[in-house]
Amino acid sequence: MANKEKLFSEFQAPTTQEWLDKIEVDLKGADFQKRLVWRTNEGFNVQPFYRREDLKDLKAVDSLPGEFPFVRGNKKDNNLWFVRQDINAEDAKAANAKALDILNKGVDSLGFRIPGDSVSKAFVATLLEGILPQYVELNFTTCQRHCVELASVLLDYFKEKDYPLAELKGSINFDPISKILAKGKDTSAVLAQGKSLIETLKELPGYKCINVNSVALNNAGAYIYQELGYALAWGAEYLNILTDAGVDATEAAKRIKFNMGVSENYFMEIAKFRAARLLWAQIVKQYEPKCDCACQMHVCAYTSAYNQTLFDSYVNLLRSQTETMSAALANVDSIVVTPFDKPYETPTDFAERIARNQQLLLKEEAHFDKLVDVAGGSYTIEHLTDAIAQEGWKLFLAVEEAGGFLAEALKGNITNAVNESNAKRHADAAKRKEFILGTNQFPNFTETSEGKAPIACACCCASAAEGTELPALNTARLASEFETLRLSTEKAPKQPIAFMLTIGNLAMRQARAQFSCNFLAAAGYKVMDNLGFKTVEEGVDAALEAKADIVVICSSDDEYAEYAIPAFKYLNGRAMFVVAGAPACSDDLKAAGIENFINVKSNQLETLKAYNSKLGI
């Protein structure tokens, strides 16, 4: 220890200003703010580095795991979470067989979706045969109007089997507000059943029954601060409704569960869950609960379906793996990994097995379940936690000042705000401001759909649902428009060929050919790169010999003045002519009749749609 102290004493810690001075030297005159400061969609900037001094005013840094305000998690000595898998339980016997099978493969939390008209003592008995609820978390979703009935049936079943009621853990997904958002249906009348549901489950203290399904917002493209702020307002709305109905505040808070989404923004998602616990604890504290444990937020995290893709679908595994890591490191209570093939089929046994193993890998190999709040003390994550908490709190207060979450939902304001974010993200994806790996960035050049088609969503448009005047959440995935474009190309009689006419400066022609290949392959075109041509005539002849439909000239800005017009004239309309870049001589090229240019500022989606139209697709 003495040697270590001596070693460290020999080094003088540089100041923040010294770091900044060094960075400015390395940037060689480039703008620090533009190059290194990240401007988030959440309304705040993220610096390229943080130091201990940046945390000096953050009160939550001094808290301990398992203690109010629970920013560092609800547990003190481990980070165990439930590995959950959901099952469609239309057939009780088949669902039971599947549940028993996956319980032997690492799952310790089951989610059953039961049709409302199937809720009965016999159905539940068949569904749960051989499952010991004292060792497995059981979660149930059914028609909102049948939740109380289901709770009564479950309680009677557990009593008949003489299970230890106080030890059982699970949930019933009662959340009428989610139907207002997802379906555009006014289901507010069902909210009155919340009190009865809690009373029915009185003998099952470990069962949550009032749910906040903000995962629906995540899957509709909501920004992180939106899901956070709206989830808090959503939960507060249920607290108000229940306490106004005469439910004790402590009991009401203990019955609330949050089902939240988690997207690919790794550090921000870790911060989101930490901030959520911090803020929810503060909200519940205002109701003066009998114990701080009522202030704990209980979260089941679902990896996002919004960023999943049909093409290059194995990339979905990379997305869901980092999402699962975010949720696990953020100390959530349970995790559901969305299978990689969900966008285009009912998940296969293989996809579900991989989804389970993604969590088991983090537990058994990486030991994520052994350490409490690994992220705690990280200067960056502590800063992000505080920053996103502030933005989420602003949105929460705005909703409260507008009359509360239910009132805003019934006005359509929540749905419209999320749909606006979805539209903005789709527009950013079209312009490649938001990358979708394998779709608008680095697509697989040779992949075909092999008959895969997107599964239609019941609520994939923002228009009002039939018989209502309320908007519904738009759950069109971020890649959906690119997939529609690529599928239409695939159905064409001939796959369009895009030929790179590379000429001139070696570095520039290679860079622009690579850019152009990625740009055009996103539409499903066959792209043909080349080593370079001595003359434009040689390049055009090679393109025509290859039966190219599109010829892309790739060179340097200075050389386009020399090469582009002769190439265009020699091609003479025998194929579409495209210039890769935005050279200073663009006006001269346009005057010569050249219409098509692609560059980093192009709207990729609209450009490719226009090319398909010109090609008769």
Image: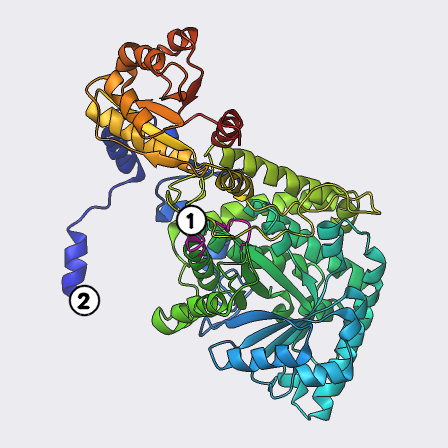
Q: Give me the residue at 63% from left, 82% from top.
A: 168
Q: Position of residue 504 (x, y in %)?
A: 22, 20
Q: Earlier in the sequence, mark 2 or mark 1?
A: 2
| Nearest the eye: 110 or 617 | 617
Residue 502's label in the rendered image is: none
Query: Residue 29: which quarter of the image?
Result: top left
Name the secondary structure under disc 2. loop
Q: Do labels 2 and 1 touch, CB within 8 Å?
A: no
For the residues marked 2 and 1, what is the alpha-carbon distance in whole angstroms?
27 Å
Name the secondary structure under disc 1. helix
Identified by mark 2, the residue type is: Met
Q: Give me the residue at 55% from left, 38% from top.
A: 425
Viewer can see residue 509 = yes
Can you identify the residue that label 2 sits on?
1
Residue 412 among magenta residues: no
Q: Position of residue 177 (x, y in %)?
A: 75, 55
Q: Position of residue 254 (x, y in %)?
A: 67, 70
Q: Is residue 274 left or right of residue 533?
A: right
Identified by mark 1, the residue type is: Leu
Q: Is residue 108 left or right of residue 546?
A: right
Viewer can see residue 203 = no
Can you identify the residue that label 1 sits on?
55
Q: Position of residue 22 (x, y in %)?
A: 24, 34
| Nearest the eye: 192 or 477 | 477
Q: Magenta residues?
A: 304-316
| Nearest the eye: 76 or 200 | 200
